[in-house]
Amino acid sequence: MEKFIQLLEQSISQESLIYISFGNLRQKSNPYRKVTLRPVILRDQLFYQATYHYEKKVTHENLKQNECQSFCIQLLNNTFKQCNLFCVEADYQILAAKSDKLKIIKKSPSKTKDISQLSHNQEKQYLIPDGQPCDFLICLGVMTKEGKVIQKHYNKFRQINRFLEIISDVIDYLPDNPKIIDFGCGKAYLTFALYYYLNFKLKKKVTIVGLDLKEDVIDFCNGIAKQLHYDGLTFQMGDIAEYRETAKADMVVTLHACDTATDFALMKAVSWNASVILSVPCCQHELFSQIQNDINMPILKQGILKERFSAILTDSLRTLKLSEHGYDVSMIEFTSLEHTAKNIMIRAVLNQNTKHSQTAAMKKAAEEFKELCSFWHVNPTIAQL
Ligand SMILES: C[S@@+](CC[C@H](N)C(=O)[O-])C[C@H]1O[C@@H](n2cnc3c(N)ncnc32)[C@H](O)[C@@H]1O
């Protein structure tokens, strides 16, 4: 291990490290199969970005320079039997079947360091890249005709690409020709992106309906869909709560639909047994006027904390309700907090094993839901639907 530590120390301090890859798991039950690390520049500072490769997704963690060494040692000690270290001067293969007996094989370097690639943004491979004309982004004013993203719309462009990354992670749960509903689609940047990605990039025959209260927005979106010949994409005016379409949707998307509109969307999705639900709640006001708990008065007497806490409780209850109905639920970061505080997404995938019978996990979620409501003295819309 001593030699490995020296090697890491040297390559990190001299900034000669290009890439590290950990593989060959010690325990097959580990949730991720591989971890890779590469230097990135974020806000003019050098970080090491660790990428965890799961079966169907990847996640990232940015480490400071002084955290990188212990992170690597722990991985080799506890999780992986092999590490490949690519440095400017050489490649090293580290074999550690037993963590106290390492074998280090040095080879001539196979990678070169490209400083320009250290930039986080340049390195990022967007599913819809900047620089290539994309018809709906041009129509919606995000890109110029030449394909350059307009600076003031860069956050929207990033959000669209982040959304498509999340879609690519859930695609395996959808049928070949999925039917999708976007509740509260607004000006539909994300709805168009979804259609573009599934229909043109993944070649799926997708049907998407965008629903919104606003007539002018619906007319505008239908006009663009027609102009671009996005034949499977239509927009309807209506209230989510009143939506009576009975045909099943395979995926329900509801992004930033205000307050309890999200609950109506979630429960519609549940009633259809939708395979995937992606929801970014916002303006969770409902519980603010209900929430009450003596022990927690110090939190609740501060308006700003009460507001944030009400939002967290609302979303916790939503995730429990979805779990109670057989969904595997996770809360993920949608966009970076730097761009908007409305950045938490509920990602729910219907667990096929729970389709026909209630599992212990579903029962537990139902109990936890009741307990939480009673502890905080709340009766949220989602409980009533
Ligand atoms: C903040 S915008 C979000 C637009 C889009 N989903 C996005 O994330 O970019 C919220 C949209 O939800 C719509 N909305 C809110 N409540 C709704 C309801 N009950 N039924 C249908 N649409 C609703 C609003 O009209 C608005 O266009």
Image (spheres, grey):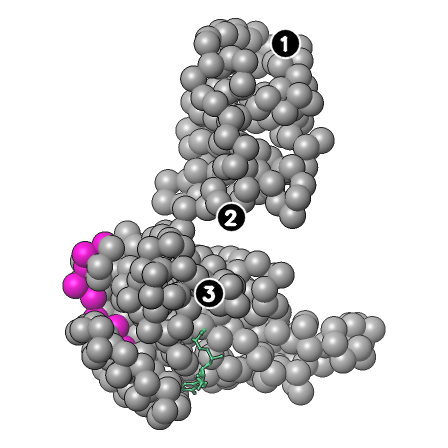
Across and down, in percent, residue 77 comes to 59, 21
Mark 1 sits near ligand 1, with its Cβ under 8 Å away? no
Check the image and report above or below for 73 versus 133.
above
98 horizontally vs 143: left or right:
right
Q: Which residue is tagged 1?
A: 3
Dividing the picture into quadrants, the one containing residue 274 is bottom left
Q: Which residue is drawn at the image coordinates 57% and 7% (left, top)?
A: 101
287 horizontally vs 260: left or right:
right
Residue type beneath disc 2:
Asn
Residue type beneath disc 3:
Ile
Q: Which residue is tagged 3?
A: 150
Which of the two marks, 1 or 3, is nearer to us in this view? 3
Residue type beneath disc 1:
Lys
Could you say which is closer to the camera, residue 173 or residue 163?
163
Magenta region's main secondary structure?
A: loop
Q: Secondary structure at mark 2?
A: helix
Across and down, in percent, residue 65 comes to 68, 32
Magenta includes 203?
yes
Magenta includes 211?
no
The quadrant the C terminus occupies is bottom left
Q: Which residues are magenta?
A: 202-209
Which of the two marks, 1 or 2, is nearer to us in this view? 2
Q: Secondary structure at mark 3?
A: loop
Q: Quadrant of ligand 1?
A: bottom left
Q: Which residue is tagged 2?
A: 121
Q: Residues within 10 Å of mark 1 (few under 14, many from 20)?
A: few
The residue lying furthest to the front in this view is 146
Tell me which label, 3 or 2, sits earlier in the chain.
Answer: 2
